[in-house]
Image (spheres, rainbow, N blue to C red):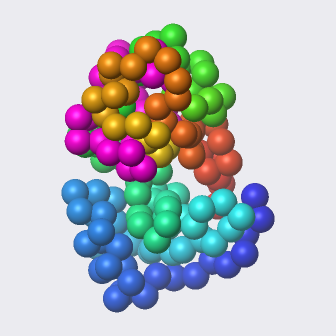
């Protein structure tokens, strides 16, 4: 990963991101060191050196490390245990492997993919179809993977 810039986030911009994060604003506690890391990957917000938030199309969204610190209840896709090894390799989520999906998910939404047994985050991606179709469909891709366990963002050491 090639780092282009790293700088502290101004208070005004920090408040904007906290407002956009909504229920996940607790990922940025008060009196913490908050920085932006610009790289060849999506921009990351570092909270005390941990990449807890990534910026996709100007919108902040929790990384998998952020999702582990703050359990996510909405925009979740649950996959069966057979899909876990493929998810850990960065594969896109296929409809047959989906057990459950938030019915509020719309095409183009950013979603978190979790396993059915432990409900631990495996990946995050962009929905290709809506939540109801994900569960009902028996073929094709449902989620395009953007970030997964074991990728460069997950293994980022600062």
Q: Nearer the viewer, residue 128 or 121?
A: 128
Taking 82 as reference, is 111 left or right?
left
User: Is residue 121 left or right of 29 when viewed as pictured?
Assistant: right
Residue at the limit of the structure toward the top, as seen here: 82
Q: Position of residue 121 (x, y in %)?
A: 42, 34
Whether the magenta-drawn stretch holds residue 138 is answered as: no
Q: Is residue 110 above or below residue 96?
A: below
Seen at 42% across and 50% down, the residue is: 108
Residue drawn at (54%, 64%), measured in percent from left and top? 44
Q: Tally the marks.
A: 0
Q: Quadrant of the C terminus?
A: bottom right
Of the pair 139 and 86, the residue shown nearer to us: 139
- Tell me if residue 114 is in the magenta stretch: yes
In this picture, residue 36 sits left or right of residue 23: right
Q: Which residue lies at the image location 34% right of the left edge and 37% below the top edge?
A: 130
Instruction: List the single residue furthest toward the right.
Output: 2
Q: Quadrant of residue 76?
A: top left
* Residue at 41% from the left image edge and 64% from the top image edge: 60
**Residue 62 showing in the rendered view:** yes
Q: At which x and y percent is residue 23?
A: 22, 57
User: Compared with residue 57, is residue 12 higher up or lower down, i.e. above or below?
Assistant: below
Q: Is any atom of residue 119 visible in this view?
A: no
Q: Foreground: 146 or 3?
A: 146
Q: Is residue 132 above or below residue 109?
A: above
Q: Which residues are magenta?
A: 94-123
Location of residue 18 in the rendering, given as x and y in whole percent from the top left corner: 30, 71
Quadrant for the N terminus in the image: bottom right
Q: Nearer the viewer, residue 77 or 153?
A: 77
Image spot of residue 36 (x, y percent): 54, 74
Name the side, left or right, on which 26 lies relative to 137: left
């Amino acid at each position: 990963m090639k780092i282009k810039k790293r700088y502290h986030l101004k208070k005004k911009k920090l408040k904007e991101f906290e407002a956009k994060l909504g229920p996940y604003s607790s990922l940025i506690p008060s009196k913490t060191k908050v920085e932006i890391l610009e790289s060849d990957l999506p921009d990351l917000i570092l909270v005390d050196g941990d990449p807890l938030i990534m910026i996709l199309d100007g919108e902040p969204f929790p990384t998998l490390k952020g999702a582990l610190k703050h359990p996510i209840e909405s925009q979740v896709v649950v996959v069966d245990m057979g899909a876990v090894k493929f998810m850990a390799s960065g594969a896109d989520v296929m409809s047959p492997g989906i057990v459950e999906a938030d019915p509020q998910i719309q095409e183009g939404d950013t979603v978190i993919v979790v396993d059915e047994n432990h409900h631990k985050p495996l990946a995050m991606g962009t929905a290709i179809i809506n939540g109801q179709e994900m569960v009902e469909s028996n073929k094709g891709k449902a989620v395009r993977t953007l970030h997964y366990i074991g990728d460069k963002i997950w293994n980022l050491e600062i």
